[in-house]
Amino acid sequence: MLRLLTTRLVAIVPTLIFATFTIFGLQHIGPADPATVILGENATEERILEVREQLGLNDPLVIQYGKWLGNVATGDLGESIIRSERVATTIKTSLPVTLQLVLSGVLISVAVGVPLGILAATRANKPTDVMVTSGSAIGVSIPSFWLGLVLITAFAINWKIFPARGFATPGDGLGEAFRHTLLPAFVVSTSGIAIVTRQVRGAMIEALSADSVRTHQAKGLPWMTILWKHALRNSAVTIVTVIGLLVNTTLGATVVIEAVFAIPGMGFRVINAASGRDFPVIQGVVLTYVVIVLAINLLIDIAYRIIDPRIQ
Amino acid sequence: MTAQTSGEAVPSDSVGPAGALRLQKFDWLWADTRAKVALGWVLVVLFVAIFAPLIAPADPSEQNLRSILAGPSSDYLLGTDDIGRDFFSRMLYGARVSMFGAFLAVLVAMVIGIPVGLIAGYVGGVIENVLMRIVDSILGFPAIVLAIGLVAALGPGLTNAMIAVGVTFSPSVARLMRGQVLATKNHLYVDAAEQYGSPTWRTVLRHILPNAIQPIIVQAALLLAVAFLAEAALSFLGLGAQPPTPSWGGMLSRSSQFLQVSPAVQLYTPGLAIALTVLAINALGDSLRDSLDPVAGTERRLRRMLAKTTKGLGSNDANNSPNQPEANMAVPPEIHPATARSAQS
């Protein structure tokens, strides 16, 4: 297991290096000069040159990249241009918020999607299945931010059950955290539910058509045991793959939803930073997203081998 | 994706033969009608997008300050927005902006992805390794996050935003293309062309590309739907289409700032328009895949045959009945690229 972990970690290194290169490159591919962005259009020529010198923008790109990477490696992500805050602090405060939302979204997707997928698989091509399948087609087609707005109108403005904006973590009291998380987490999970349902349905249909299922049935094993113990187990690899995919999708979905519900997570921060061209924040936050995705892929890889030792 | 179609007609726990038959027919009609309705809706949106200036009752940026956030009336079919512009006309023009944006993103993805996939697949070796490493690491970014970063770099605006979205889509196209090239390039006709002294570019363009392109077309259709959603999201966030350009996402963003006072139709129409269009494009992409994919095609024929036989036989036991060929349908054997390549040399 340790050897596996090391080889996997080594394999990630080139990907991570290329990712940092892309992230660093972001502020250099555009037409905007970072010094002009900081100082505004009306700054004097001398002042711009001065700031360029300060920021090290006159060094060759490779040197700049090396310096930046060195700083990142030691946890120094620089300082925000528009808010006087260290980028590391921004991430430290916004990451838990986003993770809470992602985790809740994933939980809802699995809790709703897996039973729906099994239901559809056991009734393949019957009205129930057609309904579930169409439902998931709709789930991936609805713009999540719009669904968020509709739910805010209904549950927050008209009926005043849930708050329309803001967020609370379990530190602020469990009840508050729940009230603030439920609505956005549900919105975030819509496409996730659809993905899980589809994949579980497909995997279960295949698992249920296996000869072993027929044998179990002939033996007189209860249908529920066949379903939950044997067929579901044979679809486990697919389900783990789906969960990996799901975390990535949900992570992407939180970006826009954080803006809709004014939740101070990483998505909210990166959008504000993008409008203000606050590159240190963009770079830091995007890098954090990439690290999360890579970490999840690693975990999924390991999970495969635990579930199915045949996979090499 | 294939998993979901590969076993569609699998028996359910207790369906009588009559029920199974009826439902299979129903399923077919449903699938077929769905594609037709979807095509109809997409054509309507395209028509509106092209002819917006001719059918719109008002100028989309003309303001009537005496009528602000008004509800639907005979003058203003969907009411007016927060600065008194005709919402209906803006919806019609919005179709144009959103469609253009979605097509642009897919075009960019194709223009980057197809050549990269072709080169990686055909040339192989170190170049393939390097290209695929880059492709894989771009796939490691959540697409929307990378798109936002790119928009920040290029500056906000519809064109820049959709170029950014296209760039984030391109790795998936490159990957698919490479796989297709690997599967195609060992066919005899490619070998024959090479033996006859056809130049590399000609072999690639005349023999490999046309035979590898079908899944790419399906992918393009499915990406179009995602691009449509991405355009809406980025315009909603203020990074896409800039005011006064009307786009469905941007209009939702404005309506959302006046949620408590703006007419309800102005919250529902842009959202429903986006959802229906994405649903329709997805449905079209699905049926396109079914009709192009030989495996799915065979499945259809088999299912049709099966429907006939069940009718003839009138078998009683549908509970996990074994005569369902598509469940265990063998995937057509593929020549493994690596072995074929070594055999060649």
Image (cartoon, coloured by chain):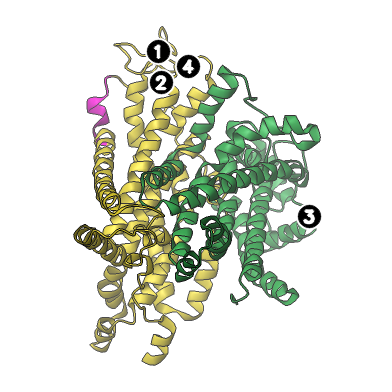
Colour chosen for chain B = yellow
The residue closer to the viewer here, A135 or A233, is A233
Judge whether B68 appears above or below A124 on screen.
above
Number of the label disc, if any, that sits on residue B71:
1
What residue range appears in magenta?
B50-57
Q: Which residue is mark 4?
A: B262
Mark 3 vs mark 1, CA separation in Å: 54 Å
Q: Is A66 left or right of B160, judged from the image as shown?
A: right
- B56 in the magenta segment: yes
Mark 3 vs mark 2, CA separation in Å: 49 Å
Circles 2 and 1, Cβ within 8 Å, touching? The answer is yes
Q: Given the image, what chain letter belongs to the residue carrying mark 2?
A: B
Mark 4 vs mark 3, CA separation in Å: 46 Å
Q: Nearer the viewer, mark 3 or mark 1?
A: 1
Q: Would you identify the image quadrant in which residue B175 lies?
A: bottom left
**Element under disc 1:** loop
Badge 2 or badge 1: first in the primary sequence: 1
Label 1 Cα crowd, 10 Å radius (few <14 / some 14-19 / many 20+) = some
Give the residue at x 50% y 45%: A191
Judge whether A243 appears above or below A83 on screen.
below
Q: Which residue is mark 3?
A: A75
Camera sees residue B240: no
Q: Given the image, what chain letter belongs to the residue carrying mark 4?
A: B
Number of the label disc, if any, that sits on residue B265:
2
Judge whether B311 appears above or below B203 on screen.
above
Colour chosen for chain A = green
Q: Nearer the viewer, mark 4 or mark 2?
A: 2
Badge 4 or badge 1: first in the primary sequence: 1
Circles 3 and 2, Cβ within 8 Å, touching? The answer is no
Q: Given the image, what chain letter belongs to the residue carrying mark 1?
A: B
Q: Given the image, what chain letter belongs to the residue carrying mark 3?
A: A
